[in-house]
Amino acid sequence: MTNTVPIITLDGPGGAGKGTICLLLAEKLGWHMLDSGSLYRLTALQALRKNVESEAQLAEIAANLDIEYLAEGDRLKILLQGEDVTDAIRTEQVGSKASEIAAIAGVRRALLDRQRAFAVPPGLLADGRDMGTVVFPHARLKIFLTASPEERAKRRYKQLKEKGIDANLPDLVAELKARDERDSERSAAPLKAADDALLLDTTEMSIDEVVNQVLQMASQRFGSNVN
Ligand code: C5P
């Protein structure tokens, strides 16, 4: 099934705009979307709540997550065991814990099939760090989105403020850089562009410009499938 479903992967560091771009593209194309970072964040939230540290227990949490994704207008509501945790998983504390446990091979393995199950017709937009390299290596369009750390921190700051979550810009820059380093240097599925990925630096681009550029790439790759 996954080989025939059109898949666009969007990988890149935190704050590069992948989430926003993916949501907009999924809406325009009428395709499904996978926010793979949310799976690591949900595992992290459970781990923090249950005070779990051992790798085996963390992998078990990842394997048994009871999650529901509900599309609500232009946002995705996320339920964990029936509880709305959409905002709770977006804090820097959970993000930081997510990147820590994402380095554990057992956790990544536990989440692999769950991620691949998102590839159903008419198509999938997959947002993450290893979508094009590990989870969907056969995807026909792979994009690696980047932006400078300062620009990414500014975007995240704005997002958090809009959600009423307290944030501090210099702390965000430091946290993003630390997370980039952890994500890029880990041995299990490190953050890196697939050899066949197209690089898109969004530092100077508006959201609309990025969306239009990806749509153009998609119609070149998939032809009438995306019209
Ligand atoms: O994308 P987001 O910031 O929500 O991801 C949180 C963390 O989850 C990342 O910093 C990264 O360590 C991890 N992650 C990952 N692989 C993915 C998606 C996210 O390792 N495909």
Image (cartoon, rainbow, N blue to C red):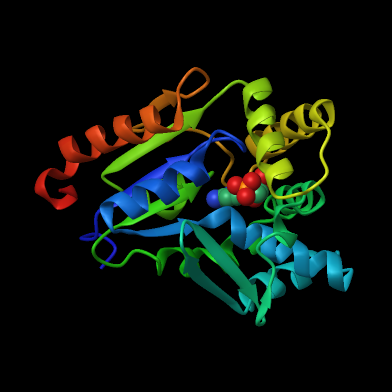
Q: How many marks?
A: 0
The residue at the point 54 percent across, 56 percent down is: 36
Where residue 217 appears, as percent x and y from the top left, is 24, 33
Q: Where is residue 13 shown, x and y percent of the image? A: 59, 35
User: For the view shown, which residue lies furthest in the left direction?
Assistant: 224
- Is residue 188 shown to the viewer in this render? no
From the viewer's perspective, tell me whether residue 16 is left or right of residue 87: left
* Image-quadrant location for residue 171: top right
The residue positioned 15% from the left and 52% from the top of the image is 225
Residue 177 visible here:
yes
**Does residue 114 sit above or below 195 in this rendering?**
below
| 188 is higher (above) or lower (below) than 54 | above
Instruction: State the image quarter where residue 109 is shown.
Output: bottom right
Can you name the residue that lies furthest to the top here?
204
Q: What quarter of the picture does the N terminus occupy?
A: bottom left
Tell whether 40 sits left or right of 131. right
Which of the pair 18/7 is nearer the observer?
Answer: 18
Residue at the spot x=65%, y=63% of the render?
A: 86
Image-based side of 133 in relation to 28, left or right: right
What residue is rendered at 76% in x and 27% in y? Answer: 173
- In this rendering, the answer to whether 193 lies above or below 202 is below
Closer to the camera, 88 or 95?
A: 88
Residue 145: % across, % down = 47, 31
The x and y percentages for residue 33 are 41, 58
